[in-house]
Amino acid sequence: MSREPSISIVLPAFNEEKGLDSLLPELKLLYPTYEILVIDDGSTDLTKSTCNKNKVKVISHPYTMGNGAAIKSGVRHASGDLIVFMDADGQHDPADVQYLTEKLLAENYDMVVGARVLSTHSSLIKRTANWFYNRLASMMTGHEILDLTSGFRVVKAKIFRKFLYLLPNGFSYPTTSTMAFFRSSHPVGYITIHAGKRAKGTHSNIKILKDGVRFFIIILKIGALFSPMRLFLPISATLFLTGITYYGYTYLFYSRFTNMSALLIISSLMVFLIGILSEQISSLHYRDSSH
């Protein structure tokens, strides 16, 4: 008879004393057997004291290293077979932890993500940006991604640790881990959640323009790493069709083959060959990640 998996809850925190003061007692009441780890990412407020007051284990960084770095520290120190990641600012409902873990265990997922309904995003700009990134990431992975940037998720620790080296130190670990799981054929499930407002006194450290560009680059990077032809083939095809169309136009009206047509067609061939080479390199990554 197999034993019940042990569960760790990892909370990355930077100046989150307000949120933790209400969140930690509730987590301890609902999940008394779970390991709770707070990763204090160089906070300058009473985050560490709040953890000590609630008798919760806290790992402190000597200086601010980033949300992704806090996640890495949490994974390295967590002892559970499953790891739940959630924000420390009070946006995530502790009761939803149970639904995430139950879905993962019942349906044999390797990761289950709390997908926020669009109305819970704080502004139209954020809702539009998240919709765009979800669609782009879905195209790159070949699977529907309901919420690419949600930090509320449960994962199988052994599998998540295989991709730890891919995670950036900043605010895009959800993006990277979601795409890495999908492209490595680790099943990812979703449950719908309603994210609440941040605890009073906390603020978001994500900047729309700066981090939006970062998310876009990460989507392309991870897509190119795990499925290069999904990135390079459309670019190659677009260049080739543009070159052929332009050649048809110049031949029909001027009876000549221009340098621009040649450049576009040759560029499409080069991009296609780069994609083929990237596919071969990607296959080596699959071999190294399968252990």
Image: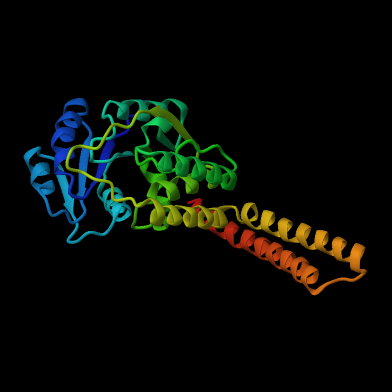
Q: Residue at x 49, y 57 (%)?
A: 217
Q: Residue at x 12, y 43 (%)?
A: 51
Q: Is residue 104 visible?
A: no
Using the rendered view, name the quadrant where residue 276 is placed: bottom right
Q: Is residue 271 visible?
A: yes
Tag count: 0
| Closer-to-camera residue (118/68) | 118
Using the rendered view, name the quadrant where residue 9 is placed: top left
Q: Position of residue 186 (x, y in %)?
A: 50, 41
| Closer-to-camera residue (165/2) | 165
Q: Position of residue 159 (x, y in %)?
A: 42, 45
Q: Residue at x 13, y 37 (%)?
A: 21
Q: Residue at x 63, y 59 (%)?
A: 279
In this rendering, position of residue 60 left or right of residue 97: left
In this rendering, position of residue 271 left or right of residue 59: right
Q: Position of residue 20 (x, y in %)?
A: 17, 39
* 167 lies above or below 78: below
